[in-house]
Image: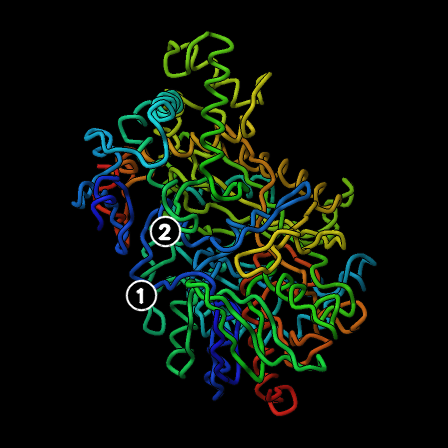
Amino acid sequence: MKAVSERVDVVIVGSGAAGSAMASRLAAGGKQVLILEAGPDRKPGSLISSGIWSRRLHWGGDPVIERGDDPISHVFNAGYGTGGSAQHHFAVWPRLHPEDFEIRSQFDRALDWPIGYAQLRSYYDQVQAASGVSGDAELEVWRPPGDPYPMPAVPRFRQSELIARGFTERGLKVAPLPIAVTSQAYRGRAACIWDGWCDSGCPIGALANPLTIDLPIAFEHGARLVTGATVNRILTDPGGNYATGVAYRTAAGETVEVMASLVILAAFAVQNPRLLLASANDRHPQGLANSSGLVGKYLMCHPGATVYGLFDEPTQCHMGATGGQLLSQEGYAKTTHADSGAFGSYQWIIAPAVKPTDLLGFATTRPDLFGPSLHDFMKNAAHHFANMVAVIEDMPVLENTVTLSDRRDASGTPLAVVSHTTHADSKKLWQTVVNEGKDIMQAAGAREAWSGPQTAMHIMGGTIMGQDPGSSVCNDFGQTHDIQNLVIAGPGLFPTSGGVNPTFTVHALVARSSEHLLQNWNTISRSA
Amino acid sequence: MTERQSRRTFLRDTGSGVLGFYLAGQILYLTPAEAREQNIPLRVLNAHQARSLDALGEVLLPGAAAAGVVHFVDHQLAAPAADQLLMIRYLGVEPPFTPFYLGGLAALDQQAQARFQKPFADLDPSQQTTLVGQIAQANPEGWDGPPAPLFYFVLRSDALDVVYGTQSGVESLDVPYMAHIVPPSRWGE
């Protein structure tokens, strides 16, 4: 083992949506940026259009031990390699609603965010212009105030037309799905050809992932990326007052230290708290930034509800974006289903493009079938299958945690243990939504309608932000309350999950935070 | 490549993602089906385990055996965990995955022996179907392996991968594949 030190302005742990966006903005602001990524290097040319090959994009690092009644499917939801989980994300980019930021104030439940929608709105607008979002703001009647989408809505194929009949039949509105995919050529990027390979990484640049949007900007401004670099410790000064850098393990087993004036953790909602806890020292015996005792607490994961149908008509279910074609947020109000004891927001994502196999393929929707009947189903479903998925709010629970295991990785760092059980009210909402979905699918004319088990979508929380250092880990810019030049970026900051996909909000928070960090660089950053 | 390695036939992925079989100092680019036809030696599974997996794959999805499910699974199990492309990596099972597969195949054979006094591969088709239908639902009495329904789901996914997860498999359903970057050309041919 040998240590090789270098000094940079900013070291960023993780190259996913948050890390890459931070890198592009801080590098463009004149900072010397180094990104450390645990997984391998990826280039657009390596993104093979295949459900089998794209499994490489999902987590392949140190094992995460999952416990609880409702595991978070860490391997599937996390990413590995350049671009992190954003490299296989579906780019469904709705905004959080104003009430998502103030559940405590409005409903005396859960937590408030330290900021409101009004403070984030301009950053949503800024990000959607830079990354390109397709949609129709007028038809999206539930949408909070914001600029119109910079590109027209995605095209509709037969699958969405058929399912939309069911929503109409039940008096529910639908709108084009807001999605960060090019419905037309946009700022030098090609228009999407709607082939349903989004989750394999989109090598043509139609989908706004880090390889397409932020990393090229970061590199243009001098940022560097080191892959195969697993960070295992955050370094501090002897007094524990500020972060001085990180130590990482190379693929060859060498330990390298990087010194930095600002340390940003963007390694997603499980590895960030793991790193903070594993970096405990004399000054921070509970782990870094953990004076509140809340590092690793309030971990959330949207319970997904999936509903399927077989139609007599052809559905063209292989066409479109993996994210889907239509959106319905008719049930977004927190108390829509209060009569059943449920609480929280949800949205329907209608008509995701679907392939025959893989975890989200139509073959998986009927796990009971095997033998000749499975062949029959495959031939039928290939042309008549339809599906929709609900993103359901996961109310934060203190006992849903990331903690450290007694087991350790190759460098001696304890592995992460994740325990997650969905809040009882969220489970009630899930069941209500599943029933609603099957009813809609039947109303649409499906000759068969069925549902899948609760799925785990998106990982959030674990390093929540708030105004009070005693009840949160970070402030509203992601700076940890205890160590101001140690910053968290990503969905781990969310105090509540809302009922929408998180990546757009991650970008908006990064835009706001990076602006603050640059404007206040001299007071926030610390030279080691 | 050392002489010893050249005799130990092994499989690996090249950087370009093409499935390469090293055999006696030569690289052979084969599909799993071709590897099966040419009887390329296995790295992880022994002959009995391979025969059981071949039979199970065929019950789960007729055609999976000929499509090379045994060589596909064996190839993936021999790769480093982060590079393995089996569906099991999504399903909450911690790598290495080999004990899961070997434990499941052994438990399946144990069940076949206990009920029919034959290994699974030697059962008649109706006996095989009955047993597979049972493990799909719950652990049969005396099952001594990974959770039976999960084992069923994982192996079913592998069978689906080799039959319908390839470009030709998708196109066999009269669905255009429409790749941006085509998967390795020898897969699934």
**Mark 1: few, some, or many residues within 10 Å (few <14, many ≥20)?**
some
Residue A411's disc is none
Earlier along the polypeptide chain: callout 2 or callout 1? 1
In the picture, residue B141 is in which quadrant?
Answer: top right
A142 or B63, nearer to the observer: B63
Question: Which amino acid, by three-letter code, is at mark 1?
Answer: Ala
In the picture, residue A435 is in which quadrant?
Answer: top right
Q: Residue at x 63, y 63 (%)?
A: A492
Between marks 2 and 1 in the image, the one whose residue lies nearer the viewer:
2
- Colouring style: rainbow
* Residue A379 horizontal/vertical position (percent): 34, 29
- The residue singled out by tag 2 in the image is A197
Question: Which amino acid, by three-letter code, is at mark 2?
Answer: Trp
Image height of A356 relative to A202, above or below: above
Q: Which residue is drawn at 48% across and 31% down?
A: B153
* Residue A241 horizontal/vertical position (percent): 71, 82
Q: Residue at x 48, y 58 (%)?
A: A85
Q: Which residue is drawn at 52% across and 18% down?
A: B134
Question: What is the chain letter for disc 1?
Answer: A
**Inter-mark Cα distance, 2 to 1:** 15 Å
Q: Left or right of A524: which side holds A63?
A: left
In terms of secondary structure, where does tag 2 sit? Answer: loop
Image height of A95 relative to A527, above or below: above
Q: Left or right of A269: which side holds A374?
A: left
Asked whether disc 2 touches disc 1, contact meaning CB atoms under 8 Å apart, the reply is: no
Question: What is the chain letter for disc 2?
Answer: A
* Residue B136 horizontal/vertical position (percent): 52, 23
- The residue singled out by tag 1 in the image is A190
A446 or B136, nearer to the observer: B136
Pointer 2 and pointer 1 on the same chain: yes
